[in-house]
Image (spheres, helix red, strand yellow):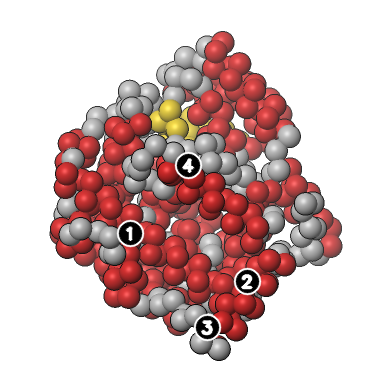
Amino acid sequence: MPTPEREHLLSRGKLADRANLFLGRAWERGWLPPPSLEPDALWAIAAKGINDSVHAEISGRSDEDVADFRLRLEKLCSAMAGEAQLNALGHAMAHGQLVRVIRNRLAFGELWRVQPSLLDTKFAPPIIVIGHMRSGTTRIHKLLASDPAHSHTRYEDAYHPVPARSGMNRIKSALDLAMLGALNPWLQSIHPMGVGEVEEELAWISAALHHSIYESQWHIPSYSAFSEARDPTPIYHEFARILRTDAATRGIADKPRVIKVPAFAEDLPALLAQLPDARLVIATRDHDAVHRSAVSLCANQMAIQSDHCDLAQIEALWEHKITMREERMADALEGWTGPIAKLHFDELNDDWESAMRRCYEALGLELNGQALTAMRAQMAESAKGTHVAHSEQLKRFAEGS
């Protein structure tokens, strides 16, 4: 089925409209109970099937980390109730996301109670790609990840991180993407994803309730402000625990992992405290281009889950995010003495091979023929990708403004 044209930034797919209408009617007429967004109710649902949820909550975690998650959940639920103006579909999606986050947290606790050695896993120094979303970070991430000498996270590892029976996380991920694609026909053009494809670790910091994934879907300014001002150390403690677990269970701890989340720019001191031997790659791009693309992504996510989206609010949010991330990143990098490479979006467009050669040299890595061959294949595949449609959307919106 051909993808419908995205007529404006707040366009919504037909299936999302139908699902929203059905859920609203079902709740009004008593066919289905509306799912709760209260912290205690979410916790009770998520804990079903967990043998000892009390110990699962604390296993492998400090008291401070446990308390931080509980407080964040309370604040996030309060912001959703008071600010987000979710429609029925958004309400259901929010419920599902938060139940999954809590369930995974408890499942990890059960795992770490039985296999505490996972938390002591030693892994090769990682390569961290840092920069605004839409600044070329994904391209750099995928090029570096294509090098056979490196490792990376896949979609199935990112969004279903708790180890499961062979193939189960892959099946769950395929179902996720099928459902998301049906509800949001423009998702793959804005952020292409595949079950076994290279994926950023956004879901791993979201698992500890970092604000970035949630503020991109819901209007929750009070939670954004709360989380931005709060010490993110507990979030990156959980991130490191998941990273060690994934490295051990997948048998890839010996290969440098290429990791990337745009929100890392907000929290570099906390991230680098966990990964002090990392190599850094900084991606840059023209401010206006980053802003346009970020607004497009955020508007696409929000429009599905609320009937009251305000484009001006979304634009203001991303002006704030871009400025804040640049300031925080600059402050953090002033004291950084480890390997670092800087790549500009236009440089990658003009001559990506030269850019990557310079990147490897700055990081003290060898760019051999095998790696270059893999990178060329990645670029050839990318040229045929669905993301090209997003560039066309942005150009059309700009011409019509």
Between marks 1 and 3, how big is the CA–CA gap? 26 Å
Residue holding disc 3: 31
As drawn, the label of residue 19 is 2
Q: Is residue 129 visible?
A: yes
The local secondary structure at tag 3 comes to loop
The local secondary structure at tag 2 comes to helix
The local secondary structure at tag 4 comes to helix
Q: Is residue 36 above or below residue 335?
A: below
Q: Residues within 10 Å of mark 3 (few under 14, many from 20)?
A: few
* Residue 357 location (% of width, % of height): 56, 19
Residue holding disc 1: 103
Tell me the residue at 62%/77% (across/down): 22
Give the number of the mark in front: 4 or 1: 4
Left/right placement of residue 89 relative to residue 266 reads right
Residue holding disc 4: 170
Question: What's under tag 4, amino acid-wise?
Answer: Arg
Question: What's under tag 2, amino acid-wise?
Answer: Ala
